[in-house]
């Protein structure tokens, strides 16, 4: 009789279909095989997080973007740069390309006091937030102010 596979999750991947894959590495028992677990999440369950007042939804389904009318919003872009910004209104944006670290003012200035956003992210910045954008890769985004 084969010993049961005992594993530890080593990577998690969220697919655009709403499927989450967990790769597991074997522990002491087993024969060096890897297990793969798949968990399904419905498209209506937003895979969103909020950190330092910034809400980020990673790779929302096209149905969510259509529901919001994202593709009809104006576009804005910038090259690699670093600059301060204050939101005079709530902004929702969808990054088509780019990578940015956003450092909200007053967050403490520590190593973890930023939010990283990248292509495929739907992001909401609250009205009144002042921050610094550190653009590592040129940005192209759709945006909407409310």
Image (cartoon, grey):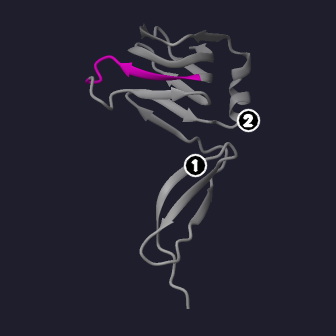
Q: Are marks 1 and 2 in contact (CB under 8 Å)?
A: no
Side of 39 where 136 appears, left or right: left
Residue 14 placed where, x, y %?
60, 46
Q: Which mark is residue 63?
A: 2
Give the spatial CA distance, label 1 vs label 2.
20 Å
Between circles 1 and 2, the one closer to the viewer is 1
| Residue 104, magenta (yes or no) | yes
Residue 52 placed where, x, y %?
37, 28
Local crowd at mark 2 within 10 Å, few (<14), some, or many (≥20)?
A: few
Residue drawn at point x = 56 percent, y = 34 percent: 57
Residue 39 placed where, x, y %?
61, 58
Given residues 102 and 137, the one toward you in this image is: 137
Local crowd at mark 1 within 10 Å, few (<14), some, or many (≥20)?
A: few
Residue 128 placed where, x, y %?
40, 13
Residue 45 figure quarter: top right
Instruction: State the residue lying farthest toward the bottom.
Output: 1
Instruction: State the residue lying farthest toward the front.
Output: 32
Residue range highlighted in magenta: 98-108
| Residue 43, magenta (yes or no) | no
- Upstream in sequence: badge 1 or badge 2: 1
Residue drawn at point x = 27 percent, y = 23 percent: 109
Q: Where does label 1 land, which residue?
A: 13
Residue drawn at point x = 73 percent, y = 16 percent: 72
Classify the position of the C terminus by image quarter.
top right
Side of 2 where 40 appears, left or right: right
Callout 2: SS = helix
Given residues 99 and 56, the one toward you in this image is: 99
**Looking at the image, how many numbered discs can be counted on the residues?**
2
């Amino acid at each position: 009789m084969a010993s049961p596979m005992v594993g530890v999750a080593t990577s998690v991947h969220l697919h655009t279909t709403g499927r989450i894959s967990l790769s597991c590495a074997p522990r002491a028992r087993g024969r060096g095989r890897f297990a793969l677990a798949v968990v399904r999440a419905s498209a209506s369950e937003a895979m969103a997080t909020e950190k330092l007042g910034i809400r980020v939804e990673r790779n929302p389904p096209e149905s969510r973007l259509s529901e919001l009318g994202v593709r009809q919003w104006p576009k804005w872009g910038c090259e690699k740069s670093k600059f301060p910004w204050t939101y005079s209104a709530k902004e929702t944006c969808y990054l088509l390309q780019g990578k940015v670290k956003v450092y909200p003012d007053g967050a403490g200035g520590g190593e973890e006091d930023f939010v990283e956003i990248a292509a495929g992210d739907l992001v909401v910045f609250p009205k009144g937030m002042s921050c610094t954008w550190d653009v590592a890769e040129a940005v192209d985004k759709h945006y909407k102010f409310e």
